[in-house]
Structures are given as C-alpha cells and as structure tokens.
Amino acid sequence: MRWVVTILLEYEWRAGAPQSGTEREIMRTNTEANVAGSAVKSEIVKDNQFRIDAVPPGSALLVGDAAVFDVAGSFCATQAKCTHRGGPLNEGTLDGSTVTCPWHGSQFNVCTGVVLRGPATEPAKAYRVTVEGEIGRVEKEN
C-alpha cells in the first residue's frame, strides 16, 4: 500500500493534478484495490496524515505538499519543495536533522526550516507534526 500511495503522490507532485476526473478515479480505484488485498492495515488516512511505520528513522515521506522526516524517532515536517528551485526535499539526503536538496545541494534544518547552506536563501516552511497511536498528522497553520 505504501508504495502505491507514494507513487500516486509522486505522480501528482511531478505531473500536477490529474487532467481529468476519470484519471483520478482510475488511480483511486487501483489504490483501493491494492489495499483491499494487502496484508497491510487498511486504516484510511487523510491527506495530511501518515502511518508512522511508513517513515523509518533517517528517512522522509511525501505527505501532501509536505515532507515528513523521522529524526531519531521524532517527526519533523517542512514544505516538500526547496525554496531555491523547487527540488524535492523528501528525496534529499537526511543527516541528523539536516536535509540536502538533491538538485543543487541547499541544506535545511528539517525541524525549523532554517537554511544551513545555500544556494537557497529563503527558509523552508516548517510544520508541527502530532502523533496519535500509529497515525501522524502534519498540522499547517491556516
């Protein structure tokens, strides 16, 4: 299930929203069909939620338009796109609480969004992450 959802999110992020309702419905049907037959718990999560076991320590997960990072068992989240040229921070290398953008090497603190090394000059938006049981939630201010 995790890889299906990740592929769907990656597709939407890179290609933009599906062009038609039919395309989105096909993707949703395929995802639900794969989940129904899987051994993975099929608990439904909302757009801003994730299963905490989907983010092992030292890794990242794309959750909507946020990148969630597991820093030594604690979860931090930033905007998913680098402030320099929009690189995918969830695909960057995570070293402690520092993520390196895979496109041009900008580094950010994933808990505060502060730029640690350019070429980026603007900080990334940082979001609070809460965990209830096995579900994490990215909380964005409105």
Image (tube, rainbow, N blue to C red):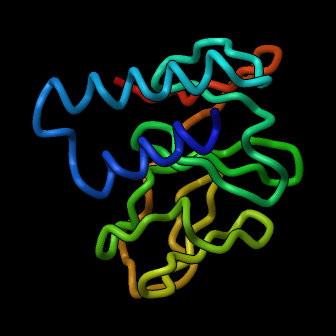
State the residue at coordinates (88%, 53%).
Answer: 72
State the residue at coordinates (21%, 32%).
Answer: 23
Q: Which quarter of the figure has residue 37?
A: top right
Query: Front-most of 16 and 121?
Result: 16
State the residue at coordinates (39%, 60%).
Answer: 81
Residue 128 horizontal/vertical position (percent): 60, 34
Quadrant of the snapshot with the N terminus: top right
In the rendered view, tell whether residue 68 sits above or below residue 39.
below
Residue 119 horizontal/vertical position (percent): 40, 87
Q: Which quarter of the figure has residue 108?
A: bottom right
The count of marks equals: 0
In the rendered view, tell whether residue 26 sits above or below residue 115.
above
The extreme right residue here reads 72
In the rendered view, tell whether residue 109 sits above or below residue 9.
below
Residue 138 horizontal/vertical position (percent): 56, 30
Residue 70 horizontal/vertical position (percent): 76, 49
Q: Is residue 13 visible?
A: yes
Quadrant of the snapshot with the C terminus: top left
